[in-house]
Amino acid sequence: MASSISFACTVLTLLLIICVQSEAKLSSNFYDSTCPNALTTIRTAIRTAISRERRMAASLVRLHFHDCFIQGCDASILLNDSSTITSEKHATGNMNSVRGFQVIDNAKSQVEKICPGVVSCADILAVAARDASVYVGGPSWKVKLGRRDSTTANLSLANTQLPDFQASLDSLISLFSTKGLSARDMVALSGAHTIGQAQCVTFRTRIYCNTSDINLGFAATRKRKCPASGGDATLAPLDPVTPNSFDNNYFKNLIKKKGLLASDQVLFSGGSTDSIVLEYSKKRKKFESDFAAAMIKVGNINPLTGSEGQIRKLCYTVN
């Protein structure tokens, strides 16, 4: 009798675990009943921010990407220093570069007014990236929701697992592979550089020390505002043709050897991704479709769900 009861309890426990896991999956209608106006509220905040500064669209896409690559999509990148946390904002790939924190804070504040303690900062980051893309003419995609926020950050991972602006093709492919992303995903995601700007310090070596894999006229133009020394924070558009519109000119630029960053041009430098760049340069819709699919994959990198983590009241600090 005792063994039968024990067996029944084991079965019940397993069923409960299965139910919890099922409920913990991300869903596009996660907030339909708990905060039905969440997405509209976030969208309004994001559109307002980008209308004030067009560059913010690229920054918000990048912010979500940099969050998901470290510990998964858990809003750890938003956490400030505290007695227990060393912020990921200090990482080499983030410091004085990643931006848009105040936009996310504002969106969170607006959502908290209508649904306190319901919508996570991690979900706001994911929705903001999609809304930013749409605002500047890029593709839309269905964002699955239900992520929760971490109570930790990981500076050491941020220093080693974010793509470097001088990375080789093989290292980029390998890094993206560790996140479950293919070489095609990597090229499509790199296409986000069709909008936004980069600091002089990130492309100085390319325009001054490279004569074989760069258009010399393009290099000369960039040198006018990026001196050989100093002016590290001076900005240049990643796509000089249509820097504020989401299109496929980024790939056309690579074919002309006008990639601003070394990690851009390496996608079209006689390697295995050349054919993908050529394809995207000719087929904008294919690029946009693949970009949207890759962003969905990014948003699914190791999210916290169910009872994991927390729903932060303020995105920059734990509760």
Image (tube, rainbow, N blue to C red):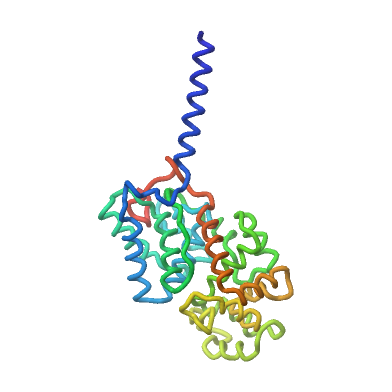
Specify the farthest residue to the left. Answer: 113
Q: Quadrant of residue 43?
A: bottom left
Q: Quadrant of residue 189?
A: bottom right
Report x, y in % for residue 76: 45, 54
Q: Quadrant of residue 87?
A: bottom left
Report x, y in % for residue 287: 58, 69
Specify the farthest residue to the top. Answer: 1
Residue lying at 32% horizontally and 65% vertically, measured from the top left? 44
Report x, y in % for residue 183: 66, 63
Would residue 87 appear left or right of 173 to someone viewing this image? Answer: left
254 or 117: which is nearer to us? 254
Residue lying at 55% horizontally and 78% vertically, measured from the top left? 201
Residue lying at 51% horizontally and 81% vertically, measured from the top left? 237
Would residue 143 appear left or right of 203 to someone viewing this image? Answer: left
283 or 146: which is nearer to us? 283
Residue lying at 54% horizontally and 12% vertically, measured from the top left? 3
State the count of labels.
0
Report x, y in % for residue 276: 66, 70
